[in-house]
Amino acid sequence: MSSSAQFLKPSAAAQRLGVSAKALRLYEQRGLITPGRTAAGWRAYGPDEMARAAEIVTLRALGLSLSQLARVLGDDPQGLEPALAAHQATLEGRIRQLAGAVEKVRDLRAGLAQGKSPTARELARRLGPIAEFSVAFDLPWPWGGERFELSDVRPLNYIIGPLGSGKTRLAKRLAETLPNAVFLGLDRLKHGGAAARAQLDAEPALKSRIDQTLTWLVEDGAAASETLVALLVGLESKGAAIVVVDMVEQGLDQIAQEALIAHLRRRGPGARPLFLLTRSCAILDLAAVGAEEAIIFCPANHSPPISVAPYPGAAGYEAVATCLASPEVRARTEGVIAWRPQVA
C-alpha cells in the first residue's frame, strides 16, 4: 500500500463522510465498497474507496435501500423513480418551511423600518422552530410531581434512561396527554402478529403500504418477521397523530433495527411524530442523530427528564451513551428488571 498518508482508518473515514463506522462496515458486508488492508490486516480507506463511499452516502440520503444502491451503482436504474419521488416530496416540504420562515423575517424587517422593534420573546416565538404539538403535565411516580413541559416535538423523539428511571411511565403519560396519541406496548410481541394479519386482511390500503415498507426493509437485510410486521402496523395506527413505542428494538435483530431506523429517518420533516423508547445503539446512534430528531433522557436519580443534544460535552450526553448497548448485549439482558418498592 503506497503513500499511507492518503489512507484513512475506519473511524477517520466515517467522520469525514458524516456516517458511523458501522455504516461503513454494513456497506462492505453488502459488497458496495472494498477497503484496502494494511500489512497488519487493518482496514484502510484510500481515495478511490472514499470517493465510492461518498457516492453511497449521497444516494442513501435520497432514500435508496442498499439493494437499490447496488443496482444504481451497477448502472441499473430500476427502483430509482420511487426514491426520487419521495426525496422530492421531502425537499418540497422543506421549501414550504423555509418560505414561511422567510416571510416571518420579511415582516420583522418591515416592522423595524416602521420603528417597531420586536422584543426578545417575540423574536424567539416568531423565528424559533414551530412546534405542532406541545404538552405539559405533572410527572408521575417515581418523580415527585414536578412539572414537565415539552414544546419542541420532532418527527423522531427518543426516550432513554437506565433501568428503573421511569421512562416507560413518562412515555405512557405522554401518550395519555398528547393529542390523538397512541401507546404501542410490548403486548405487540405476544398478540401483535395475529392482530396485525387480521387488520391487514381487512384494510387493503394499509396492507399495500406495509408491503411496500417491508420490501424496503428486507432489501436492507431485515427479516420479514411477525414482530416487525406488527410494529409497522402499529406505527401506521389509524387516526393517531402521534405514536409512542415501548422498547422499539424488542424482538428485532441488529440488521432489522438498522433498517427500521433508516426507514423512519427517510420520512422527512412533515412526518407524524414518533416517540421511541430504546436502549439500543442500533436505534439511537448518537453519531447519526439529525436535525429532525430529539433525545429525552430520564436520569437514574429521578431528577426531571431533560433534553440532550447529541454531541460530546453536552449536558447528559455521557449518561445517555452509558445507557446504550448493542443489540447483542440487549438480547442477553432481555427480561432483566430493576427492583422498585411497592407504592401504597
Image (spheres, rainbow, N blue to C red):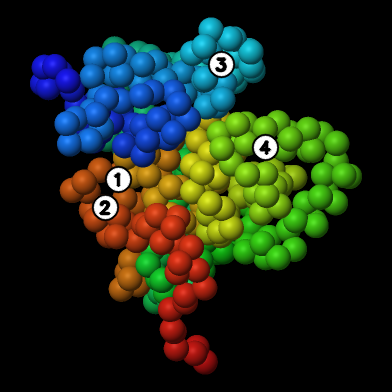
Badge 4 density bin: few <14, some 14–19, many ≥20, Cα 10 Å: many
Q: What whole-number distance in Å separates the C-alpha atoms at marks 4 and 3? A: 19 Å
Q: Quadrant of residue 26?
A: top left
Badge 2 density bin: few <14, some 14–19, many ≥20, Cα 10 Å: some
| Three-letter amino acid code of the residue under disc 4 | Leu
Query: Where 291 falls versus 147 (above or below)?
Result: above
Residue 172 appears in view: yes
Answer with mark 1 or mark 3, whichever residue precedes in sequence.
3
Image mark for residue 71: 3
- Residue 2 image point, x, y percent: 13, 17
Residue identified by numbered label 2: 317
Residue identified by numbered label 4: 214
| Three-letter amino acid code of the residue under disc 3 | Arg
Answer with mark 1 or mark 2, whichever residue precedes in sequence.
1
Residue most extreme to the top: 75
| Three-letter amino acid code of the residue under disc 1 | Ala
At 44% from the left and 23% from the top, the residue drawn is 32
Answer with mark 4 or mark 2, whichever residue precedes in sequence.
4
At 36% from the left and 16% from the top, the residue drawn is 52
Q: Are marks 4 and 1 in contact (CB under 8 Å)?
A: no
Badge 3 density bin: few <14, some 14–19, many ≥20, Cα 10 Å: some
Image mark for residue 309: 1
Residue most extreme to the front: 39
Q: What whole-number distance in Å separates the C-alpha atoms at marks 4 and 1? A: 31 Å
Secondary structure of the residue carrying tag 3 is helix
Q: On the picture, is 61 further left or further right than 195?
A: left
Q: What whole-number distance in Å separates the C-alpha atoms at marks 1 and 2? A: 7 Å
Q: Nearer the viewer, mark 4 or mark 2?
A: 4
- Residue 154 image point, x, y percent: 47, 40
Q: Are marks 1 and 2 in contact (CB under 8 Å)?
A: yes
